[in-house]
Image (cartoon, rainbow, N blue to C red):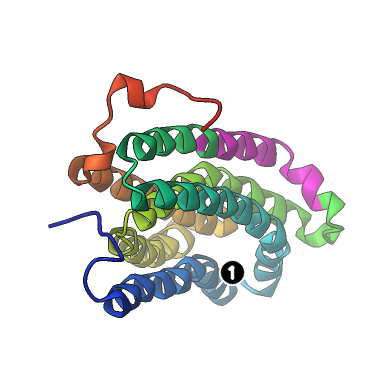
Amino acid sequence: MTYTKKMTEGSELKHIILFTLPLFAGNVFQQLYNIVDSIIVGKFLGSDKLAAVGTTGSLTYLFSTLCIGLSVGAGILISQRFGAGMHKEVKKLITNSAYVILAFGAVVTVISVALAGLLMKMMNTPENLLQDATSYMRAACSGTICVAAYNWINAVMRSLGDSRTPLIFLVVASLLNVGLDLLFVVVFGWGVVGAAYATVISQGISAAGSIIVGFRRNPYFRLTREDAKPVGEV
């Protein structure tokens, strides 16, 4: 199976349709994480717990969007080099974009977890929701590095013409998230923290699976030491 594809070879309309459909589906499944959390928390834990989870939404969305924005930028640069046949540049961009995006994700993870309580107070979270909101925020943001990793590998694979592989792992992770939510919230009784950790674990599996497939099957991930060197101008 080919894990890179040039969109200008063969029927361009067919390539565009086959490439775009997984993107739309991926956006839908990305939203399912929060939707599932909200449904299960609201049904089994009550309206106050659901409200606490809801107060964290704007911040967790902001952190995710920043990771997505960096990944999209990297994907644009990679796709330009890939289309131009600049194979060495593609590999350098893959490694250097990983350094930047994963480092950013790690920094955001540490800061958001450490400052979760302060951030919730700055958002004027009601006192009766503050403890649960802070706990959920801290647990959910511990997975920001996973969000960064998934969106990086997703952007890289898309820029090389493969939008299907990341979608497969995203679908699997979304279904796993449902099961883990029920297990952690209903069976184990971990409350809102359980819902957050279910999402974090699912996101981590989605990222890890996509990265493993990328490195095993995509020739652009067969990197030399030279390819892996940090390059400032890239």
Predominant SS of the magenta segment? helix
**Residue type, mark 1 in image:** Leu
Q: Position of residue 147 (x, y in %)?
A: 50, 50
- Neighbours of disc 1 within 10 Å: few (<14), some (14-19), many (20+): some
The answer to which of 177 and 89 lies nearer the viewer is 89
Instruction: Determine which quarter of the picture holds residue 109.
Output: top right
Q: Examine the structure image and report whether residue 35 is included in the region drawn in magenta.
A: no
Q: Examine the structure image and report whether residue 111 is included in the region drawn in magenta.
A: yes
Which residue is pictured at 12% across the width and 57% down the height? 1
Instruction: Determine which quarter of the picture holds residue 115.
Output: top right
Q: Position of residue 91 (x, y in %)?
A: 35, 36
Q: Secondary structure at mark 1?
A: helix
Relative height, residue 17 to residue 93 (above, below): below
**Residue at which label 1 appears:** 45
The residue stretch that appears in magenta: 102-120
Q: Position of residue 144 (x, y in %)?
A: 55, 46
The answer to which of 188 and 100 lies nearer the viewer is 100
Relative height, residue 232 to residue 110 (above, below): above
Which residue is pictured at 31% across the width and 46% down the height? 85
